[in-house]
Amino acid sequence: MMGMLRHFLSVLLGVLTFLVLIKAQDQSGFISIDCGLPENLNYSDKITTINYISDANFINTGLMKSPLNVSRYTFYEIIYTPSIDYIQPCLVNTGNGTPFISAIELRPLNNTIYVTDSAKSVLSLLTRLDIGSITNLQYRYKDDVYDRIWLPFQLIDTKPLNTSNGLLIQSIYSPPAIVMSTAATPVNVSAPIIFHWDADNVTDQYVIYMHFNEVEELTKSEARAFNITVNGLFFYGPMIPGYQVADTILSPTPLTGAERYIISLFKTENSTLPPILNAVEIYKLKDFSKSETA
């Protein structure tokens, strides 16, 4: 079930999105295809409970092969709004051997989130991180209603904070409650939180989503507020996370023109506590204007 194309998030139809919003914890609108599974067979994954079907009725070309023994898997995820009522993933030999695919997964999203300026633009996932994880586990469905995959990550010079309070007021992005129950904060209370990524090309465009939730119930004498900068330039602030309230801050326009993007979270002068960060998603903006083939 692991393969070259692991995860494919798409806003397919308004009806499917509507079903996801109503039935937040079921698989309405999920399309999960196990490539190479014999025709008429289906099963439910023992860990995720996601239902998989064979690709026999979907493929136009290609051969069915026996499962490969692999020590690791690679997944490619995009968020895409198709202009027609079908999607054609196509794998092309680029000179490195015959391409293969083990699974295709499509998930409908709320069409008010992950919005791009152009209908022909797609968001290609660079990374999605559960910052300050104390379990070192990855999470997806059923913890995530959209089946996004969250990887555990520890930032340098930070320590984890967590809450056992399971009541979380969600944002429209619905990050998993288990992910939002932990956060990273600087070991040095006067220091900022800093992380970065390098661009493949200075003309590349990126969109970042930072998810926040105050996991500590502050006293009247305590305050947590911080500003966010990108490469030293003001990005957002002051950010004041609400207790057990998920909030998402995103770049209003794509980030571009730099070889490296350094994100810094600095406490304000009136803040008694250092900044926190619960989770982050980074996407590269890509142009799909030439074809409806992904």
Image (spheres, helix red, strand yellow):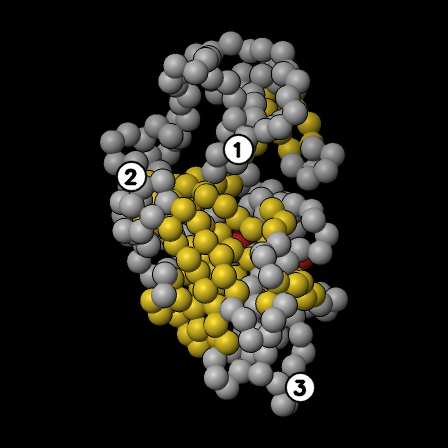
Say which residue appears at 48% left-offset and 72% top-offset.
266
Where is residue 118? Give x, y as percent: 27, 47
Q: Horizontally, is 159 left or right of 170 in the view?
A: right
Residue 242 occupies which quadrant of the picture? bottom right
Q: Secondary structure at mark 3?
A: loop
Q: In the figure, 217 relative to 105: above or below?
A: below
Specify whether residue 14 is in view.
Answer: no
The residue under label 3 is 219
CA gap between label 3 and label 1 equals 44 Å
Q: Which mark is residue 75?
A: 1
CA gap between label 3 and label 2 equals 48 Å
Callout 1 amino acid: Phe
The residue under label 2 is 287
Q: Which mark is residue 170?
A: none
Q: Nearer the viewer, residue 74 or 106?
A: 74
Mark nearer the N terminus (3 vs 1): 1
Say which residue appears at 45% left-offset and 43% top-offset.
125
Q: Nearer the viewer, residue 283 or 114?
A: 283
Where is residue 289? Give x, y as percent: 25, 36
**Nearer the viewer's eye, disc 3 or disc 2?**
3
Q: Secondary structure at mark 1?
A: loop
Callout 3 amino acid: Thr
Say which residue appears at 63% left-offset and 58% top-offset.
132
- Residue situated furthest left in the rendering: 290
Q: Secondary structure at mark 2?
A: strand
Q: In the figure, 199 relative to 229: above or below?
A: above
